[in-house]
């Protein structure tokens, strides 16, 4: 059975999704979860793009073990050296360098000849190879590149030391048969001298289909992101490619090293840190992916699951636990549940989590796994709480304007504010904004119920922007007004933490990928 390597680029291409941005601590949390998930390679970022990217790649290289850590670099000396500097502490490191090869890109964007592009690619692969053994090369916009020239570039960079050739469908243009044919020709030319990888974008909704077609034609690595997030319509979705290979092993005769039971937890973590929700009907990780509504289907399922279920929910880590915790559950049951959910906590951490659990159980009858996951993600979020909610009282009804009376701590200082608003959340947010004197703009406000029932834990996500910096904030509580206040304060605390962090070295335009 062939093992297809999974190269996760959630932290690099995924972070280029409109609206997604993660801070360094969140990236580390994601990288650690990706290791648990079993990905082979983590593309941690694009070190030359900004100081934040550089710091994130460096800290992941220092703190995350169990996967190869890759950093992206244009085929430029400064990029490659910067990537190497960030990756240096990693046990297993890879420099991923790229250069466009399509005439469209060479003529209109970079204004260089094919010969010049080939020469730069070879020279930069050689430079990367002098720094690390593991070098990957991508001919950007490969699927719109003339095949003869593409093969020439690929052959030359393999001779220069590239061990992986990644074929990007940069603009999501190709279709499965055509892409499969391209991969077959590359495989024929390169043989076993390098691993053929694919990197598909989803502009026509074909990223997963194209990647599967490439696997059938000899690709040994797939680049993908959790929940399929990424530039424009996104990238190939990791969970879809992995579960297709697992479910149709009979057809593909290939598998991955992914521990599929970690899929749902990873998906939820990405939703939480990026603020990008998964559509309910999304394959594998959507809320409805295992919900059967039709009476005929339900009847069949009751008789035999195989009738309408091709994947067991437990295979992706969705547990239908019989054991729901509540107010009367003791430390022992709580600890056992944490263990079953895969958390390895120190006794002190368990104690803190247990107190939070008991507080929640006082407000809510049944505590589900999703509730525990939210409690723990709050516990381990490393946002320092300069602004802290102490008390909140909200009143209002159909005949009286909503009013919020707020007490918050700002460092050592305690501040009281009263504000009226169009709605209760508006009143709360006005009171907070006045208390902390923020100049930030609220870009997004979203409320989600974590489990069912009117006593469910509500999770609020907000996106704030100030001076071009964007942050996500989260808060959860059984009272959604308190959850709303917590989310706003969480985002404001993150903005505070970001102050002092260097601006992006280069603007987030094409500049960051220009080759001059
Ligand atoms: O889509 C693309 O071409 C890329 C490359 C940098 C691999 O992301
Ligand atoms: Zn891409």
Image (cartoon, rainbow, N blue to C red):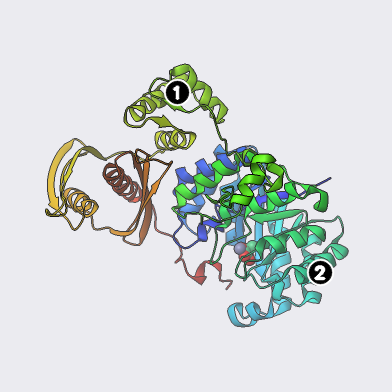
**Can you tell which mark lies on residue 411?**
none
Percent of width and height locating residue 43? 61, 51
Percent of width and height locating residue 211? 71, 60
> Does residue 407 appear in the picture of this structure?
yes
For this rendering, which residue is in front, 281 or 371? 281
Element marked by disc 1: helix
Above or below residue 360? Residue 190 is below
For this rendering, which residue is in front, 3 or 370? 370
> Does residue 90 appear in the picture of this structure?
no
Find the distance from the CA under tag 1 to the CA under tag 2.
54 Å
Percent of width and height locating residue 492? 29, 49
Label 2, residues with CA under 10 Å away: few <14, some 14-19, many ≥20: some
Ligand 2 resides in the quarter of the picture at bottom right
For this rendering, which residue is in front, 497 or 2? 2
* Residue in the image at 81% along x and 69% along y: 181
Above or below residue 439? Residue 336 is above
Marks 2 and 1: in contact by CB < 8 Å?
Answer: no
Q: Earlier in the sequence, mark 1 or mark 2?
A: 2
Q: Is residue 111 left or right of residue 210?
A: left
* Residue in the image at 40% along x and 33% along y: 379
Q: Is residue 496 left or right of residue 235?
A: left
Element marked by disc 2: helix
Q: Which residue is mark 2?
A: 181
For this rendering, which residue is in front, 335 or 106? 335
Q: Which residue is mark 1?
A: 350
Q: Is residue 401 left or right of residue 101?
A: left
């Amino acid at each position: 059975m062939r093992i297809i390597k999974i190269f996760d680029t959630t932290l690099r291409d995924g972070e280029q999704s409109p609206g997604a941005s993660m801070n360094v601590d969140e990236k580390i949390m994601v990288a650690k979860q990706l290791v648990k998930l079993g990905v082979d390679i983590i593309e941690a970022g694009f070190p030359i793009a900004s100081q934040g990217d550089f710091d994130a790649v460096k800290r992941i290289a220092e703190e995350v073990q169990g996967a190869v850590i890759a950093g992206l670099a244009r085929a430029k000396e400064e990029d490659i050296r910067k990537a190497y500097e960030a990756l240096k502490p990693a046990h297993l490191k890879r420099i991923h360098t790229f250069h466009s090869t399509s005439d469209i890109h060479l003529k209109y964007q970079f204004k260089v000849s094919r010969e010049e592009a080939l020469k730069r690619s070879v020279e930069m692969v050689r430079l990367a190879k002098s720094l690390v053994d593991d070098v990957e090369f991508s001919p950007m916009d490969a699927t719109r590149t003339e095949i003869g020239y593409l093969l020439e570039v690929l052959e030359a960079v393999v001779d220069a030391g590239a061990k992986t050739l990644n074929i990007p469908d940069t603009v999501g243009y190709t279709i499965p048969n055509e892409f499969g044919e391209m991969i077959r020709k590359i495989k024929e030319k390169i043989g076993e001298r390098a691993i053929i990888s694919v990197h598909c974008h989803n502009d026509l909704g074909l990223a997963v289909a194209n990647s599967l077609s490439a696997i059938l034609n000899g690709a040994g690595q797939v680049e993908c992101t959790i929940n399929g997030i990424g530039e424009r319509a996104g990238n190939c979705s990791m969970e879809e490619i992995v579960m297709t290979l697992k479910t149709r092993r009979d057809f593909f005769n290939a598998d991955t090293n992914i521990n599929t039971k970690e899929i749902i937890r990873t998906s939820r973590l990405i939703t939480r840190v990026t603020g990008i929700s998964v559509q309910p009907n999304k394959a594998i990780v959507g809320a409805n992916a295992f919900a059967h509504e039709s009476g005929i289907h339900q009847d069949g399922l009751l008789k035999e699951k195989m009738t309408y279920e091709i994947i067991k929910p437990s295979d992706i880590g969705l547990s239908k636990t019989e054991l729901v915790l509540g107010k009367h559950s003791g430390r022992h049951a709580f600890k056992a549940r944490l263990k079953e959910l895969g958390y390895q906590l120190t006794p002190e951490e368990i104690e803190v989590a247990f107190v939070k659990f008991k507080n929640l159980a006082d407000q809510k009858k049944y505590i589900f796994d999703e509730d525990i996951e939210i409690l723990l993600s709050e516990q381990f979020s490393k946002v320092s709480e300069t602004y802290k909610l102490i008390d909140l009282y909200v009143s209002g009804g159909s005949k009286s304007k909503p009013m919020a009376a707020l007490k918050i701590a700002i460092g050592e200082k305690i501040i009281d504010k009263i504000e009226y608003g169009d709605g209760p959340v508006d009143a709360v947010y006005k009171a907070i904004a006045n208390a902390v004197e923020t100049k930030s703009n609220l870009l997004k406000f979203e409320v989600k119920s974590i489990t069912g029932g009117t006593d469910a834990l509500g999770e609020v996500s907000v996106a704030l922007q100030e001076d071009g910096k964007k942050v996500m904030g989260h808060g959860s509580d059984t009272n959604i007004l308190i959850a709303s206040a917590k989310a706003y304060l969480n985002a404001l605390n993150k903005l505070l933490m970001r102050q002092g962090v260097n601006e992006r070295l280069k603007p987030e335009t094409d500049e960051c990928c220009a080759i001059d």
